[in-house]
Image: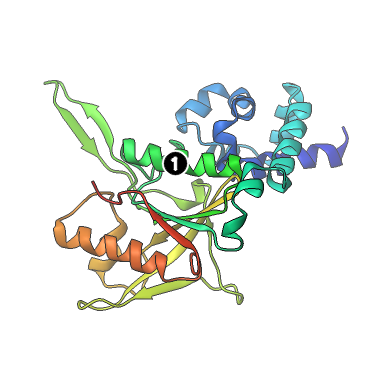
Amino acid sequence: MDVKTTSDIYDKLNSLARDLWWSWQPEVVSIFRDLNPTKFRQVDHNPVMLLEEYTRQELENRAAELMLNSRVNWAYRRWQEYLNSHQTWGATHTGLLGNQPVAYFSAEFGIHESLPNYSGGLGVLSGDHLKSASDLGVPLVAVGLLYQEGNFHQTVDAEGRQQESYHRINTDHLPVEMVRTEDGEEMVIAIQTRGGDIFARIWKVSVGRVSLYLLDTHVPQNTEENQRLTDRLYGGDQYKRIRQELLLGVGGGGQSLTRHGHHSQCCPYE
């Protein structure tokens, strides 16, 4: 077996899994599904978690067994061509933006179920905007919040009543990357409020050509109350919701992530 080729397969699959571009590419989705259909369903179609089930050698053997190598190489090449192409609608029609991308704010982004950071229609709309901007090549940067308990899980009890339960996320299992300073430290922002400063670290999500930045208040600089700001989407009382809005709008809008850009907002709270 060609070691170089099989090593590339492992790295290429992991690289593809960490860019949500794959989520609206049926041919790429089918590659992950074919690796292990049962497990893919069990992990909510999350390829990051799926690939964690395999060592490098096991994944290489599995891909060879299923004759997936040519499909993986094709998907990876297509992804790279997509990212590097300058022949886009945006390149032709959005030249006035120059180096000032649109800054798109939303409280939720429903890009794919493997990133449980949305509740319903608003999140799906926001997610579709990012996918469209990516395909069109529109210069856009998105900003939201990373909820530690994601969206809730629904079950129906013996009496037919809906029950909700929350499960804390594990960022190691998600297609997110910590934003760091030039020194390699976690980048932490701060906003001032009458109740004290609110601090947040930043996670980056790759959505094709678009970058989504999610603010997360689970940092030691915060009080326990402020750490819970990004626990749940649309959770808590009005005071908490207003502070979430401050974090999203002021924290996201005032940082270098979106500085000098054109701001757009997708109704952050219904």
Q: Is residue 121 left or right of residue 68?
A: left
Establish if 64 lies above or below 92.
above
Q: Is residue 30 left or right of residue 3?
A: left
**Residue 64, horizontal then vertical, whole percent:** 77, 26
**Residue 81, horizontal then vertical, whole percent:** 74, 41
Secondary structure of residue under mark 1: helix
In the rendered image, which quarter is residue 239 located in?
bottom left
Per the image, the residue denoted by label 1 is 127
**Residue 176, horizontal then vertical, whole percent:** 52, 52
User: Looking at numbered disc 1 in the image, what kind of residue is underneath it?
Assistant: Gly
Estimate how packed mark 1 is, as few (under 14), some (14 to 19) or many (20 or more) residues with alpha carbons within 10 Å: many
Q: Residue furthest left?
A: 159
Q: Between 56 and 79, which is closer to the camera in this rendering?
A: 79
Q: Is residue 150 left or right of residue 239?
A: right
At horizontal 60% and vertical 30% (from top left) the residue drawn is: 25
Q: Between 15 and 49, which is closer to the camera in this rendering?
A: 15
At horizontal 54% and vertical 73% (from top left) the residue drawn is: 185
At horizontal 26% and vertical 31% (from top left) the residue drawn is: 154
**Residue 160, horizontal then vertical, whole percent:** 14, 21
In the rendered image, which quarter is residue 196 located in?
bottom left
